Image: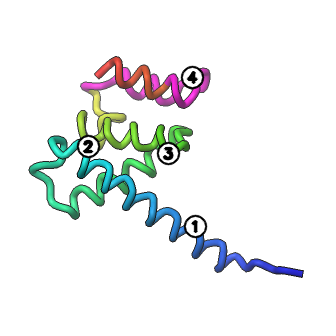
Amino acid sequence: MLVIREKQINSVVKERQTQFKKKVNTYIQKEHRNLIDKMSQTEIDVQIHSGIKKALSYDISSETGIVSFILLTFIAGLDFDINPHYGWAQKILTNDHYSENEKIEKLIHSI
C-alpha cells in the first residue's frame, strides 16, 4: 500500500505554488509590462504573492480568477479591496451570492 506523508504533500503543494507564481510573473512581464515598468522584481513578487492570498480569501480560486485579481491589484493598488476609495470592491468581494466570475466581472467593470 502506497502511503503519502503530509510532508510529501506539502512539498508538492509548495512546488505547484512556486510554478504558478512564475507563470503569473511571466504572463505579466509579457502581456502587461506597462503595469510594472517602475517596479522592482521584489515588489512584483510581493504583489503576486499577496494577490494570490487575497484572491483565495475571497473564494477566487481558479487560475484565471486569481490572475485577474492580481492584475486588478496592479491597476488599482495592492489594497484596493480595503481602500475606502474603492468601497464598492469590498461589497462585491464579500457578497456570497456572486460566483467567482461575477465578482471579477463586476470589479473590472467598476474600475
Question: Disc 1 marks which residue?
Answer: 13
Of the image marks 4 and 2, the number of the one nearer the N terminus: 2
**Residue in the foreground of this view, choosing between 72 and 25:** 25
The disc labelled 3 sits on which kind of residue? Glu
Task: Give the CA separation, mark 4 to mark 1.
Answer: 28 Å
Task: Give the CA separation, mark 4 to mark 2.
Answer: 28 Å
Frontmost of labels 4 and 1 is: 1
Quarter of the image with the C terminus is top left
Task: Give the CA separation, mark 2 to mark 1.
Answer: 27 Å
Of the image marks 3 and 4, the number of the one nearer the N terminus: 3
Question: Disc 2 marks which residue?
Answer: 31
Of the image marks 2 and 1, the number of the one nearer the N terminus: 1
The answer to whether residue 54 is left or right of residue 16 is left
**Residue in the foreground of this view, choosing between 88 and 18:** 18
Q: Which picture quadrant has residue 5?
A: bottom right
Q: Check contact, mark 2 vs mark 3: CB within 8 A.
A: no
Instruction: Report helix, strand or loop for mark 2.
Output: helix
Q: Which residues are magenta?
A: 85-102
Q: Position of residue 64 (x, y in %)?
A: 47, 40
Q: Residues within 10 Å of mark 3 (few under 14, many from 20)?
A: few
Q: Residues within 10 Å of mark 4 (few under 14, many from 20)?
A: few
Q: Which picture quadrant has residue 12?
A: bottom right
Task: Give the CA separation, mark 3 to mark 1.
Answer: 15 Å
